[in-house]
């Protein structure tokens, strides 16, 4: 079954760090760009970051630049998001997502999300 | 950066109605425009990409059109299961911008 499963969410104090992981199954991530997208409670979707298939290029939304770092391990079929200096406004459900094979940057597969609460 | 603005923010329609949701870009863009449906407690689901291409498995009552700065999602003959929030999304060169969403309810 093709899926993405996030882990590592929880409650953390402002200024602290948290690391999210995303495990892929049913496919190899090595040819796919991967994303993190977040959704604050009751709010809309906000794209956070994308990492290319080979890990050589990363892009971030301005609000997390310098605080969040995305990485990937193709051998382990996993992606991670290191979140430092967390703020209350980072509270959200964090989705791991995959590029479409046919269309670069377009998301066609989502995980169920990991909840991060900064309080 | 290109900003995406959806209208309306919420919408109530009857079963069988034709529903139209609009997404406007802050400047002209190519057809790198997608539409997603999100139901409560679920991740988003891709409906349309390249402004008008229907994703595999999506019912044909969903359609997309537009170009430049204005794009439209059309739902022909609204069904009960279409309730949810709809988002437009610009995707381009590793960057993504979402519209703020349109909540669709059944009247």
Image (tube, grey):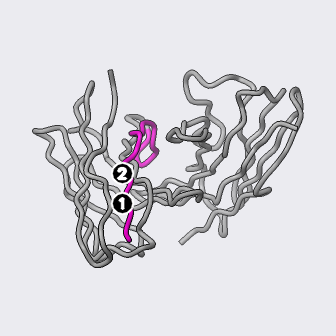
Q: Chain of mark 1?
A: A
Res. B2 image quadrant? bottom right
Res. B100 image quadrant? bottom right
Q: Which is nearer the eye, A6 or B102?
A: A6
The residue depicted at 29 percent of the width and 41 percent of the height is A32
Instruction: Give the side of residue A94 with respect to residue B104, left or right.
Output: left
The residue depicted at 37 percent of the width and 54 percent of the height is A36
Q: Furthest residue to the left?
A: A75
Residue A23: x %, y % from top left:
24, 39
Q: Which residue is mark 2?
A: A35
**Image quadrant occupied by the N terminus of chain A:** top left
The residue depicted at 36 percent of the width and 49 percent of the height is A114
Rendered view: A76 above or below A8: above
Circle 1 sits in a helix, a strand or a loop, which is it? strand
Counting every numbered tag in the picture gives 2
Q: Which is nearer the eye, A2 or A31?
A: A2
Q: CA distance from mark 2 to mark 1?
A: 6 Å
Rendered view: A7 above or below B81: below
Residue B53: x %, y % from top left:
61, 34
Circle 2 sits in a helix, a strand or a loop, which is it? strand
Marks 2 and 1: same chain? Answer: yes
Res. B104 image quadrant? top right
Marks 2/1 in contact by CB < 8 Å: the verdict is: yes
Stretch of the chain drawn in magenta: A103-119
Residue B16: x %, y % from top left:
88, 26
Q: Which residue is mark 1?
A: A49
Q: Which mark is residue A38?
A: none
Q: Chain of mark 2?
A: A
């Amino acid at each position: 079954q093709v899926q993405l499963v996030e882990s590592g969410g929880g409650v953390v104090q402002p200024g602290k760090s948290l690391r999210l992981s995303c495990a892929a199954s049913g496919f190899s991530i090595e040819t796919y760009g991967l994303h993190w997208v977040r959704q604050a409670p009751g709010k809309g979707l906000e794209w956070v970051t994308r990492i290319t298939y080979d890990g050589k290029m990363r892009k971030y939304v301005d609000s997390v630049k310098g605080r969040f770092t995305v990485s990937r391990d193709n051998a382990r079929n996993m992606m991670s998001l290191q979140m430092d200096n967390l703020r209350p406004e980072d509270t959200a459900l964090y989705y791991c997502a995959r590029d479409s094979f046919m269309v670069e940057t377009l998301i066609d597969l989502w995980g169920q999300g990991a909840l991060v609460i900064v309080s | 950066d290109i900003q995406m603005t959806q209208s309306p923010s919420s919408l109530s329609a009857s079963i069988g109605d034709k529903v139209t949701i609009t997404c406007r870009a802050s400047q002209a863009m190519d057809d790198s425009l997608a539409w997603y449906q999100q139901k409560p407690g679920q991740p988003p689901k891709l409906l349309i990409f390249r402004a008008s291409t229907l994703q595999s498995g999506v019912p044909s009552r969903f359609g997309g059109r537009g170009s430049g700065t204005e794009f439209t999602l059309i739902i022909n003959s609204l069904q009960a299961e279409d309730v949810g929030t709809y988002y437009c999304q610009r995707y381009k060169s590793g960057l993504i911008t979402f519209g703020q969403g349109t909540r669709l309810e059944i009247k």
